[in-house]
Amino acid sequence: MAATDTSSAGHGSHRHAGHQRTVWTRLVGWAPLLTVILLVGPVAAGLAGAAGPAFGWLPALGGNRLSLAPWQELLGTPGLDSMVRLSVVTGLASTALALTIVVLCLATFAETRSFRWIQRLLSPLLAVPHAAAAIGIAFLLAPSGLLMRLLSPALTGFEVPPDYLFPGDHSGLALIIGLVVKEVPFLLLVSLAALPQCQADKRRHMALALGYAPVTAFLKAVLPSLYPLIRLPVYAVIAFSSSNVEVAMILGPSTPPPLAVSVVHWLADPDLSQRFMASAGALLQLGVTLAALLSWWLLERLVAWLSRSLLENGQRRTAATFGRLLGSCLSWLSIGLLVASLGGLLLWSMATWWPFPSAWPEPLTFANWRRALDSLGPATLDTLLVALGSSLIAILLVIGCLESETVNRTRMGKGATLVLYLPLLIPPVAFLQGLVQLQAQLSITPGIVTVILGHCLFVLPYMFLSLAESYRRLDPRWSQLAASLGQSPGATFVRVRLPMLLAPIAVALAIGLAISIGQYLPTLLLGAGRLTTLTTEAVTLASGGDRRLTAVYALAQLMLPALGFALALLLPRLIYRQRRALQH
Amino acid sequence: MLPDARPSPARLSASCTTLQNSFATTDCTRRQRTYRTLYRNQDRKAHMPQPPCLSLPCRCLAGALVLAGKVGLAGTLGLALTATSAMADTLPNDWADVEHQAQGQSLYWNAWGGDSNVNAYIDWVGDQLEQRWDIELVHVKLDDTAAAVSRVLAEKSAGNDDRGAIDLIWINGENFAAMKANDLLFGPWAEHLPNFALTNPSQQAEMTTDFTIPTEGYESPWGKAQLTFYYDSQRVENPPRDLTELLAWAEQNPGRFAYPLVPDFHGSTFLKQALIELSEDPEVLQQPAEEADIETVTAPLWAYLDQLHPWLWRQGQHFPSSGPELKSLMGDGELWLAFTFNPAEPAAAVASYQLPPSTRSYVLDNGTIGNVHFVAIPFNASHKAAAMVAANFLLSPEAQAYKQRLDVWGDPSVLDLDLLSEQQRLALTPADESPARLPAEALSRTLPEPHPSWMEAVEKGWLERYGSH
């Protein structure tokens, strides 16, 4: 330093930077702890709430001593083995199928015009609530559904609907289809976010230059580095699909249903002594989900071991034509199914009396929308408040956790990571009952605050999932460069990392919004039902069997998250329209 | 001792005789303490604009006068009374005071929200409560009453005995039996509602019996339900008039009849209907199942179902999830004959395009299961006074008449027409007829519900036999 004044300025800024460094480091240092506290309390209470009764402990119902009776009763339940088998099989099969579709889709369509179309469709498709998609698919494929109406009576000769067992088939095929069409958009989204991190384009171009066919290039050069980045989201998908309730209730078999559905039935049984067995069932569900995850992990090893020689054999056209055909068929089929089921919902929302076999409701009416309009307004407002509140809290904590990793150059411990994902592993029904008890114990008045905090439990893990890899993979040299130019960690975050990560952060926020908007049980239980959201309205109306009103609410329910995803994809482009490399 | 603020000694003694058992106590300090808690609970709506005469200080003053009345009453008359319920002493012993205390309270009413007509009716009740008693009604919409039961259970487990989140539950049958048996309900209170007498409980036994369980004042009747069959008259000319005919009909029309998956309420009700009709001695069903030979009594039912199932929708391999799903399937034309527990539902569903205009309803020749649905107050409800005022309003001829209108809900009234004025009687006689609606006289062929333990026994037997393939 030459002149005194610059030197003193330099000192000043150094001191300033040092001060900021402590504040920033301390601030983000709190984030993992806060996150763990926010999750651990409720998760522990939730687990205790399920574990106590499972071993006979629930004093309010006269269960004052520990026993194994609930487990004995559970094991004596007729059809328990089928329930467990259904949960594991549908969970693994749907995940495997969805992953295959996503991989083949990426391999087939990378850098084509169709791919941009798929990307554009992605946000509305992601936003479709599970239950709405299931209702739409049921209506599409049922014997009296839209597909059969289009074919009848001209091609089939059916004047009245035929009577075949689908959806609801014993093998769970309809359930698997329903899960796949909702999992594909999710896995596609996380893959799209991860592709730039593994430098997919460069790898692919290199393989193409070496003479590999496009599909083979992706499978051999990109996939091995892409999969580790999307492994956690895949695990979340397994956990969800092996324990989901809404989709299984609509599309799954009923004699017997998958385990999670049975647990819900047992918990809702007016005979309160069933609660003990229901809690044991909830713990068993946890075990089933873990077993499914373990099987998947073993499958991963097996596939990796088997495919090693395939990857290295230098074959340029492995699965080139077949993969391409299958990829385009399956991708368009799964997207087409979802779009068609949405179309069906739209028709229902405007239908008057619409008998079989007419494929078009006549006359169309807005009466169903008008009937719903009164309560749509306030419900939308509350839905937005809760979703924004919980996603903002969650994004702050997630960024805080990841930033503290970056600043301290550490990774979160295994235990902390486990805590983070626990809310996804435990079946919500059982876990929430414990939460409600905790809330009552602490005499917290149920209302919007408890609902927002409760939603955080479910929103946070998914946001972490979607953001973590992007954050961790960001080239550390950017931060080192900023530091060498005299920037404090805080300033580096605000001026370098935040702008570069804006796109994944926006996507994480959109996912958070969508997850929060779709929550039914946490909203009902933690808010004591005092908060009316679009989802609570949709679910209670669906219980009344009015398909027209249900369709109206399902559509209203998917508009908000669709808006969120559209913003998440658009905003970075708008803000960085001058900076091509940041537009992702 | 403060002066007695109560004007009329006659009213005093009347209220003493009717209410003393549940509400009065001699313990002055305890009473004062409860009143203090009461006032804390009462002003949840402090942020709402209040009419000038009901401002916070005024209400406290009024409360103090009432309190003085209580102390005076207990002291001067020297009544040696004990409270029958631990919680009952939080309420005053005169209906006017209950109404007064209800002023300005919020009321969280947990009620099934699956029917837009019912929801609109509850909205209307909310408007009336707001206008007349300044009660803010919040309809907590449930997809299953079990959620409310679970919440009260969780609150009890957590030791929350007076700040419960639920004030009123729409309930009956098994849920009531379970809540009553596990001490999750407040009461007895129903007999103290001024309008309760209009149901003529001494003549209409079903007003005080819920699935054979005596209500003992722990719930107040609200409306009536009866298993009602409906069919599409364009496809079906002669619907089956009893269960034997139903079997023959199903064989002729395979796949066109179904009942919901047991233990769904509608599915279980169909089983109970079949059990009553098929069993040799239906009287046995009025007693707890443990007192009978379950296997023998239920044997005809299983034999019947074994015959029926191959002819059901999806060959009995898959069952609709609920009663409302039966309605959707009727609308799709997959089913041609179905049933509901709400006699007004088919007509309302025709009006909202869910069922074909050619829908007709009827009850079986030997009658069908019917019951009364009620409202109950959880033991730890925060706003018991408002809940009682609401329950009383629900029993008023005005509210019952409005509820019975087909364009509103169509739920049959629980009042005894003989006890009403000419004008009220007229209002309760339906004028708006729909061809899809059940004729009023059909509702007289009502079979009583069996004891709840039979429902459990039948559900268990069903799940063992047909619950897994």
Image (spheres, coloured by chain):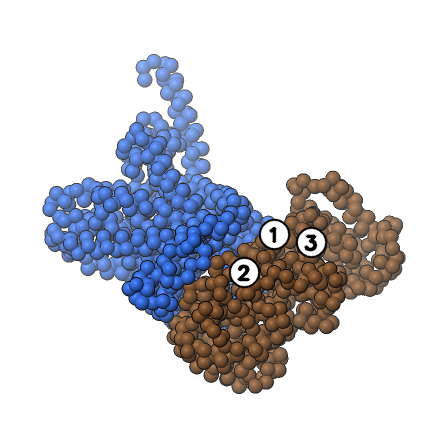
Q: Nearer the viewer, residue A402 or B282?
A: B282
Q: Position of residue B420 (x, y in %)?
A: 74, 63
Which residue carries the number 3 mark? B386
Q: How many marks?
A: 3
Q: Position of residue A268 (x, y in %)?
A: 52, 64
Which tint was used for chain A?
blue
The reply to whether residue A535 is visible in this rendering is no
Q: Label 1 sits on what residue type?
A: Asp
Q: Residue at x 41, y 55 (%)?
A: A362
Q: Nearer the viewer, mark 3 or mark 1?
A: 1
Chain that is brown in the image: B
The crowding category of the residue bearing disc 2, from other C-alpha atoms within 10 Å (few below 14, some 14 to 19, many at least 20), is many
Among numbered discs 3 and 2, the one appearing first in the sequence? 2
Among numbered discs 3 and 1, the one appearing first in the sequence? 1
Element assignment for label 1: helix
Marker disc for residue B348 = 2
